[in-house]
Image (spheres, grey):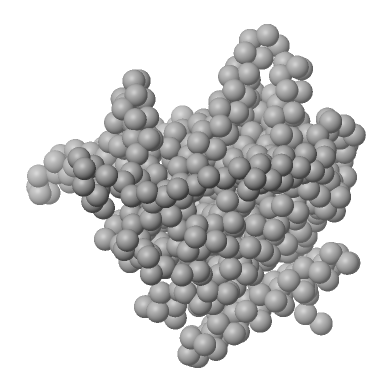
Amino acid sequence: MINLLVLFIVVPLTISVINLFFPVVIRKGLTFLSSVFLLFLCYQVYLKSPADFLMYDRLVFSIDKLGFFTLIFSQALSFIILIFSLKGVDKEIQSSFFILFPMTVAFCNGAILAVHSIVLMIFWGLTGITLYLFALLGRTKDTPKTAKKTFIIVGGSDVFLILGLLLIGFLEPSSKMTLWNVHLALSGELAITAFFCLLIASFAKAGGFPFHTWVPDFCQDSPIESAALLPASLDKLLGIYLLARMVTSLYVVTPVIYLVLITLGALTVITAVMMAMIQHNGRKLLGYHAVSQVGYMIMGVGSGNIVAYVGGLFHLINHTIYKSTLFLTLGSVEKKTGTGNLDDMGGLAKKMPLTFVAALIGALSISGIPPLNGFFSKWLVYQGMFEVIAGSSKGIQVWLLVCLVLAVFGSALTLASFMKFLHAIYLGKRPKSLDHVTEAPANQLVATLSLALICIVFGLLAMPLPLNKLIFPILTQSGLAIPEFFGLYDPMLIFWLFGSAFLVGLLIYFATRRVRLDENYLGGMESEEKFRIVGTAFYNEIRQMSPLRSIYNWAERKYFDCYDMLSKVAFGLAHFFSSMHRGLLQMYSLWIVFGFLIMLIIAVVIR
């Protein structure tokens, strides 16, 4: 009898291979059936934990509560995004899309279920390859450059993953390359090196600062469905899943490391949200917010506090839900309007009301507006951070307070940026060129409205559903105490209060409305289309504010882009060394002798 865990990999991978030989319609059907089957497998795993899978007496695949938490949301998000993709994917790429889709799901499942280091290396690397192939499906002029950048950053981080895992195997030979319950002490150069190698791999996959710059470019230049599937969902799940493993079962983390993680999380929040504020392309705006929200996850999971840890995991799934909602609603708009430029849109709420409702719920969720799910998870992270601050020394308290203020300020800027997003697309005056726009197809509405509904349900029923059913069991299995106090926040009470205020506002509006619509005039003449006020106009002033102007100028010159800076250094060194070679045999011989002497010196020093 085949192992259940293996089916999570074999079934979608088999479908991917079979799809090579069938037309697109059958590919869609087979991919859909495989996604339904994977959801059924998740239900079976939930009812009864399956047996581990061993090969040559070595544990290869296994699942615990943290693994199941990541696995079930990978399948659920993939299924909903697949529904959206059944109608609307560009005809030029849909043949390849429905081969890569199940393949990506299979590789991600393998990375989640892998217990042996070598198996994790393989599947982690394969997910990077499918990410690169998805990037190549884009149809913009920058697609090749973006695909290359994505491959180098994410693929380059795989080298650090391999090095980190090998170092763990060297330091803990008794683990036999098994990744669970190692609890390696963070003492000594090799252990610390291994930790930061894995941290680089985690941050590059999830999009954490400073390895985040591939995410906005990928979101702008790849198909919108792949942006929702990978940087918004599966890659986030994998990256933070690895980080959670690191701080709970792979290492015994020190307070200094917790401080480093919190700081990097705060930097991720504020740097990305500041860049999102000035974007005029909807995809790139969402891409920077996909990075910014990772900061809250890093702060929560990497804080060393149980309440914040719960908040970080909860925010991980919340982010995948509302960010997928936002990407898919924008995708619906793009497919109807033919543009993703915010300056070219406006007034689409009347044309696409259901899409607007889904986008509004997603925007309010990511902005942390109660009683939606984004508020609850951020609030848990903040509460945990206050507990960390209370137990720290004076100097550390100031540092942590600065990090917390940056995170809270980042949430406020998120709200401001999504006011721009909503106004630019759905409100304001609609260009005459978009008068033909109609509502999105049924499959896209089912996907976006389902995700929006989950945002509401996970906000109102956070405690009985995701926390009690999925996250608290992770704490119990990890030997952590379940927090007994989560403050006085009651989402249902907030819901009724907000609902009552909304109804009162509606009553006042309908009782007193006196609305007259007039045309705009400029110099006594009806204003032309080019004088239309766009939703991004107000935010142009932020770009010119001092000292933000200088920071934005540096960002546009790629001073904060590790890929661009390292590329310049690498090409500079290559040019320098190439200039040292003059094509003479004597010079090449000298370089060989010089390199051999360096190797001898290194060998002596290590010995």
Image-based side of 587 in relation to 556, left or right: left
Residue at 31% x, 63% y is 433
Asked where in the image residue 541 lies, by quadrant, the reply is top left
Asked where in the image residue 43 lies, by quadrant, the reply is bottom right
Between 167 and 507, the one nearer to me in the picture? 507
Image-based side of 237 in relation to 40, left or right: left
x, y percent for residue 556: 30, 37
Between 521 and 444, the one nearer to me in the picture? 521
Residue at 50% x, 63% y is 352
Whether residue 23 is situated above or below residue 137 in the rendered picture: below
x, y percent for residue 51: 84, 68
Image-based side of 191 in relation to 91, left or right: right
Q: How many marks?
A: 0
Residue at 34% x, 20% y is 546
Residue 330: in sight, yes or no? no
Residue at 49% x, 47% y is 515
Q: Quadrant of the N terminus?
A: bottom right
Residue 379: in sight, yes or no? yes
Whether residue 497 is situated above or below residue 124 in the rendered picture: above
x, y percent for residue 28: 55, 82
